[in-house]
Amino acid sequence: MATDTDFIVDTRPLWVILLGRSVRPLLLLATAGLYWLVVSLEPPAGLTPEGLRALATFVVCLVLWVSSALPLMITSLLAVILLPLGGVMPATDAYALFGNEAMFFILGVFILAACVMRSGLSTRIALTILHRFGHTPRGLLHSIFFLNAFMSFFMSVHAVAALSFPIIVEIVGVLNLRPHRSNYGRALFLAMAWGSTIGGVGTLLGGARAPLALGILRGATGESFSFLEWAAACLPIVALMMLLGLAVLALFFPIDITSIRDADEMLAEKQLALGRMRYEERAIAMVMFLTLLAWVFFGESYGLANIAIVAVIVLFAAGLATWHSVEQYVNWGVILMYGGAIALGTAVNQTGAALWLSQQTVSAWASSPSAAVAIISGMSIVLTESMSNSAVVALMMPVTLGVAADFDMPLRIMALVVAVPAGLAFAFPIGTPANAIAFSSGYLRMRDITLPGAVLAFGGWCIFNVVANYYWPLLGIHMHVP
Amino acid sequence: MNNVLLLLPPDRQVTRAIETALDLAEKRQAGLIAALVIDADAAHRSSNQMVDEGLVAEKVADQVSEALAREHRIRGQALLNEICQETRARGIECRTLMETGDPGAVCRRLVDTENVGAAILVAEKRSWLGRALGLGQALQPAALGSCEVIVVNED
């Protein structure tokens, strides 16, 4: 009789199997060797011994974040202990950077979003909009695209994608769309992923990238952006990207069905089943609205993080949230990930390693501030297709602060130049959870997402650079220090 | 009479595998057992990956996995019903089942208990890009004692 051990016969060559199982430990050993190699080098001209050790820590994080040999948050913890152990900064300073204001803003935003999701308010909004505007195939597709973008102005991108995913799965189910075959099925899932991703760059609430960039910026320079300034700089990019996104969807996935009556009925039934809006939903919507107003009008005077935390306290005080219900909706690893990233960014900048690294790379390649912005935004977009958006920000921000200093650019512009393109991941499932969620549906093949996604990413890069060069100066965000 | 086992993954294009199974069962005058197995580990793997690498909250990742599993079950049931109709139309005895678990273990159990003479497995089609990025899993042909194993590529 067959047993567990004799069932699966792996017919691959032995060396392939052994290599596959050894990659992770080998990579970790190689990374340790790389750290030792860099710290044992003589510091090159222009770099202090502390700067060299900060650079070694930066290289370790680069390898581990790109390869995902360790979970992102564990790599961040490694950075936090390598900094004091390597003599880059005292342990108390490294750990204290976990208390950065950006951390608490991110935390507050995630808890608020958790309350919105848990109460069912977000599902109600989604169903209402889809039922209201999605009566034709094109109308439903566009509704999903715009709905996800709109919701990503207020909630993190992956939460929005995860929220709309079950609804879209039901839609393709009732429409009997065939996986891998139906253009409309593919377009619906891509509209979900791309709409969320594009909307996510519009405000500081679409994910932790922008707050993380501001956290590193503030830690290194003391400068920042207000909630309104950030939105004013980014919303035109969102508007143009939305138009481009619709064009790409229409070009690559022409609609191949004529009626969505079954989906329309299903959405109507689901909306009906939700019943009237409950007190909890109304109250949470009110708190969210007031918080948004407070961020816009009092963000600079009271601080974005303080406002977010006050809103969280109000929700708990009013009995609209319980810790048990909220904690499951927040990935607490973000605290470790972002705290470590901010510590690393601050150390690389304070020791002069950022300036040295930028002089060897972007500053050497670029001839003007505009060229530097084009190179940095291009690098961010390419990197974000294959690694976590936040890891891109953590790696790029310190270096780009050095570039800004080299070209006599305002330092704070670099938060936009890194964080916005880092959010524009369209071409690979591994680029962002929104893409991964869409891909997991089974409706998309790799080529359905890579080529159209690459077109969208390239278009995004062009749009970003046009906006940076011609629109931002109108807001007083210049490439040169006036 | 030896049965023909058709082991189906939930999210693949399996028209060719179904045709092969029906032809074989007809030729051998055997019964067909169509088993759709939803890989329980796959859902956990994707959920864990989202939590670790995408910094997605556990509850949110679970909701995605649950929605996907529900869709697989609905789609799988529809597919099994289609197979059953087609099989009976050709005068072949048919039995279907859907399970969540380890596809290998389910296959082995059915081979051991259901007098299976041939097992038809579906090999996942992967693009060069998918292979390069390590997406999906390569098929690992199984040894099932005296049972014949036939691997059919996804459409």
Image: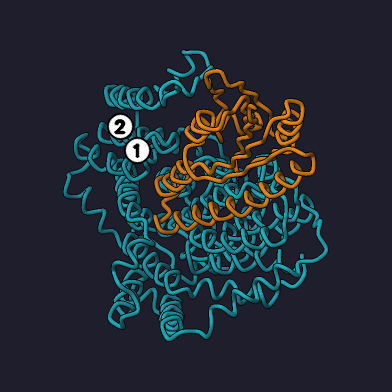
Chain ID for label 1? Answer: A
Q: Residues within 10 Å of mark 2 (few under 14, many from 20)?
A: many
Residue A237 showing in the rendered view: no
Give the residue type that dot 1 points to. Ala
Q: CA distance from mark 2 to mark 1?
A: 7 Å
| Left or right relative to A89: residue B92 | right
Residue B54 in view, yes or no = yes
Q: Is residue A450 above or below residue A112?
A: above
Residue at image location 30% in from the left, 50% down from the top:
A336
Subunit under mark 2: A
Q: Position of residue A262 (x, y in %)?
A: 73, 68
Give the drawing colour for chain A.
cyan
Are circles 2 and 1 on residues that touch, CB within 8 Å?
A: yes
Where residue A357 appears, x then y in whole percent? 41, 36
Q: Secondary structure at mark 1?
A: helix
Task: Identify residue type, mark 2.
Answer: Leu
Relative height, residue A355 to residue B26 (above, below): below
Disc 1 crowd rating (10 Å Cα; few below 14, some 14-19, many 20+) is: many
Q: Name the tint of chain B in the rendering.
A: orange
**Marks 2 and 1, the one that precedes in the sequence:** 2
Q: Which mark is residue A52?
A: 2
Q: Secondary structure at mark 2?
A: helix
- Name which residue lies at 69% across and 73% down: A265
Extreme residue toward the front, this view: B1
Point 56% across, 46% down: residue: B98
Q: Quadrant of residue B148?
A: top right
Q: Residue at x 49, y 72 (%)?
A: A228
- In this figure, which residue is indicated by the disc labeled 1? A353
